[in-house]
Image (cartoon, rainbow, N blue to C red):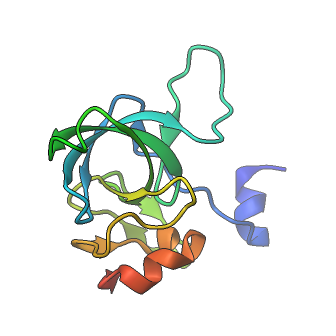
Amino acid sequence: MSKRMKRRIGMRRRISTGLVTGSMIDCADNTGARKLKLIQVVGYKGVHRRLPNAGVGDLIIVSCREGTPEMRRQLFNAVIVRQRKPYPRRDGTWIQFDDNAAVILTPDGEMRGSDVKGPVAREAVERWPRLNSIARMVV
């Protein structure tokens, strides 16, 4: 089935992935981390020698590069809440943010921080309902 046919039928459009392994991401919560480095995309199955890439709402493993001494040089699970690369929505609009940002999670999947700075993409909130309770603004 061609891409054009899929759009006419109304199948889910894939979010354009804007982050690859090694990307530096801002931390959007109040855990004490400021800059995160993307290490791995959880559940990524790709082609040999292709860098794993991630988009809004994806679960990733990050390393804290800047922040409090307790947070630095540790690995955490995180969810991407904003990306700079434009991506389409089902209604035909395109959305893009000013920065790349993620929220750190506990190993159980709970939010580690209690507050999220800045807007959160609606796609991330649909996939992670717990984000909705702590996000101030959902775009």
Q: Is residue 53 visible?
A: yes
Q: How many marks?
A: 0
The C terminus, quarter of image: bottom left
> Front-most of 62 and 92?
62
Query: Where in the figure is residue 29, as x and y percent of width and height?
Result: 27, 65
Query: Where in the figure is residue 99, as x and y percent of width and height?
Result: 22, 55
Please give the name of the residue rendered at 26% of the width and 62% of the height, measured from the top-left corner: 28
Please give the name of the residue rendered at 57% of the width and 14% of the height, measured from the top-left corner: 49
Please give the name of the residue rendered at 71% of the width and 57% of the height, measured from the top-left corner: 4
Please give the name of the residue rendered at 63% of the width and 61% of the height, measured from the top-left corner: 13
106, above or below 68, in the image: below
Query: Which quadrant would residue 66 be assigned to in this image?
Result: top left
**Residue positioned most to the right:** 1
Q: Is residue 139 visible?
A: no
42, above or below 103, in the image: above
**Residue positioned most to the top:** 49
Q: Is residue 108 left or right of residue 99?
A: right
> Front-most of 99 and 26?
26
Query: Where in the figure is residue 27, as x and y percent of width and height?
Result: 25, 55
> Front-most of 95 and 108?
108
**Residue positioned most to the front:** 70
Query: Where in the figure is residue 69, as x and y percent of width and height?
Result: 15, 41
